[in-house]
Image (cartoon, grey):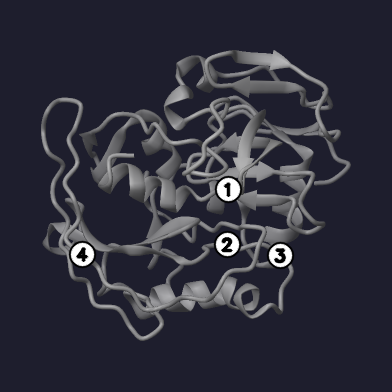
Amino acid sequence: MAGTHRRWTIRWALAAGLLALSLTACSQPQAGAVPMMTPMPTTTQSSSGLTAAPVTPSVPLDSQGFADPAFRALWQRTDADVASGNASRGWLWGTPVPFGALREPYAQAAGGTRLVQYFDKGRMELNDPNADPASPWYVTSGLLTVELVTGQVQVGDHAFQNLEPAQIPVAGDLESVSPQTPHYADYTSDRLARAADQTGQAVTAQFQRGQGVTSITPPAPVTIAAYDDTLGHNIPDVFTNYFNQDLAALGLNWLFVMGHPISEPYWITASFNGQTQLVLVQLFERRALAYNPQNQAGAQVEFTNIGLHYYRWRYHNN
């Protein structure tokens, strides 16, 4: 969609939690999947004082560190070339989160639990192991970003567990966090409210934790290229270009991968390997995207580590 300014009016009728193949990316090559062990997960206290339903531990893994052949096949389809160095693009799933293979409660799944596995960039879910493995809906993923922002963990088609919104930075280092980096919990209703169509306008809004939104001169020119009318948010050209080039090359529809945007794109300050940088971040229902003009060509747009963020929030109290 590069060079094209048009209004997008999109309707998405599929039930929450049933979109498949949520994919991600990161800029630096990492080692391939390795075997892991799954310990007893910690319980999580909800805002109402109730303890979230426990998961089932000790999910067996294959020699490559995957909890199911379908998970391995999907990862290999998208990330094997990145792991081997044969592709210069970023990760779509990334490496498995240690101890991130679990059976989580889900009311409509067989036996009331479903097999999941967390990766740096997302979560794979297997709701019905007896379904057709060739179906694009065989491996699914949930609305991770929505749950992190609202604190509502989906444990059934119409059932939710109430936790606190995640006090985790949306991008950058987790161990040496910049105090200016917004957390998921900072995306309150005013940050998620509908915005006017700004197609063709420059993206100059900066969101700083504790200081709100101000206008800045960005480190690189970025322009609004599209408007998603469903939730009322603008999408910048650096992201629409990624959708129509990188994701399209893999045969993936951006809405199928991302869901609708739930926030405006904001420049934020974040720490990467201890160095503070200004990057553009936008939250979508299923993933968050970042644009870092300081990254090498081909890796300037990358998915954040939302799978790791979610796992840490849900099982290790942020």
Task: Name the residue type under label 4.
Answer: Pro
Residue lying at 62% horizontally and 22% vertically, measured from the top left: 207
Q: Residue 85: where, in percent of width, then height?
A: 69, 77
Residue linked to disc 2? 92
Q: Residues within 10 Å of mark 2 (few under 14, many from 20)?
A: many
Residue lying at 56% horizontally and 76% vertically, measured from the top left: 77
Quadrant housing residue 181: top right
Residue linked to disc 4? 39
Residue lying at 86% horizontally and 33% vertically, measured from the top left: 221
Task: Name the residue type under label 3.
Answer: Arg
Q: Are marks 3 and 1 in contact (CB under 8 Å)?
A: no
Q: Residue 272: where, in percent of width, then height?
A: 62, 45
Residue linked to disc 3? 89
Q: Residues within 10 Å of mark 4 (few under 14, many from 20)?
A: some
Q: Residues within 10 Å of mark 3 (few under 14, many from 20)?
A: many
N-term mark: 4 or 2: 4
Q: Dot 2 lies on which element?
A: loop
Residue linked to disc 1? 255
Q: Residue 33: where, in percent of width, then height?
A: 46, 75
Select label 4 or label 2 by which is in front.
4
Select label 3 or label 4 by which is in front.
4
Vertical relation: 167 (above or below) 314: above
Residue 110's label in the rendered image is: none
Quadrant housing residue 134: bottom left
N-term mark: 3 or 4: 4
Query: Which residue of the protein is positioned furthest toward the bottom in this rendering?
Result: 63
Q: Dot 3 lies on which element?
A: loop
Task: Name the residue type under label 2.
Answer: Leu
| C-alpha span from label 1 to label 2 | 15 Å
N-term mark: 3 or 1: 3
